[in-house]
Amino acid sequence: MYDQLVENPLFNITFFGGLIFMLAGFIQFQFPPKKINSLYGYRTNSSMKNQERWDFSQKFSAKELMKLGGLLAGSSLLALITNFNDSINLIIGLFLMVAMVIILFFRVEKAVKTKFRN
C-alpha cells in the first residue's frame, strides 16, 4: 500500500504541494519583506499601493498560505479512499493545487479591500 501511495500523483501533488505552501507561508510570516518590492512576498497592484497595505498583505497572505497548505496536504487523504487511474489522479491533484492558489488570491484581495476600502 505504501508503494501505491508514494506513486499516486494525487497524493504527491497535494501532500508535497501543501507542505511547500505551509513552509512558504511560515517563512513569509517569520521574515516578511519590509519594503514594497517586485521580488519577494505577496505582490499585486492592490497590495503594492502603499506600505500599510503591503505590510497587511504580507502577514495576511502568509497566514492564509499556511491554512490552505494544511487543507491541501489534508486533501492528500483522498488518495487513500479513491481508486482512479493515474491520469485522473493527476488532473484532480493539479486542480486542487490551482484551486488553492485562486482561493488564496481572492481571500487576500477581499481582506485588503475590506480593510482599506479605497
Image: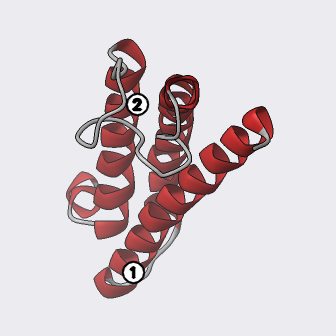
What residue does disc 2 label? 25
Q: Which residue is mark 1?
A: 91
Q: Is disc 2 placed on a helix, strand or loop? A: helix
Residue nearest the viewer, comparing 39 with 20: 39
Residue drawn at (33%, 23%) of the image: 33
Whether residue 46 sits left or right of residue 30 in the image: it is: right
Identity of the residue drawn at 54% across and 62% down? 102
Q: Left or right? Give the position of 20 relative to 98.
A: left
- Relative side of 71 to 80, left or right: right
Around disc 2, counting alpha carbons within 10 Å, would you say few (fewer than 14), some (14 to 19), or many (20 or more)?
many
First in residue order: circle 2 vs circle 1 = 2
Vertical relation: 78 (above or below) 85: above
Q: Amino acid at mark 1?
A: Ile
The one nearer the camera, 65 or 32, is: 32
Question: Which quarter of the rendering shows the N terminus?
Answer: bottom left
Q: Quadrant of residue 8?
A: bottom left
Mark 2–mark 1 Cα distance, whole angstroms, equals 25 Å
* Element under disc 1: helix
Judging from the image, the colouring scheme is secondary structure
Nearer to us: label 2 or label 1: 2
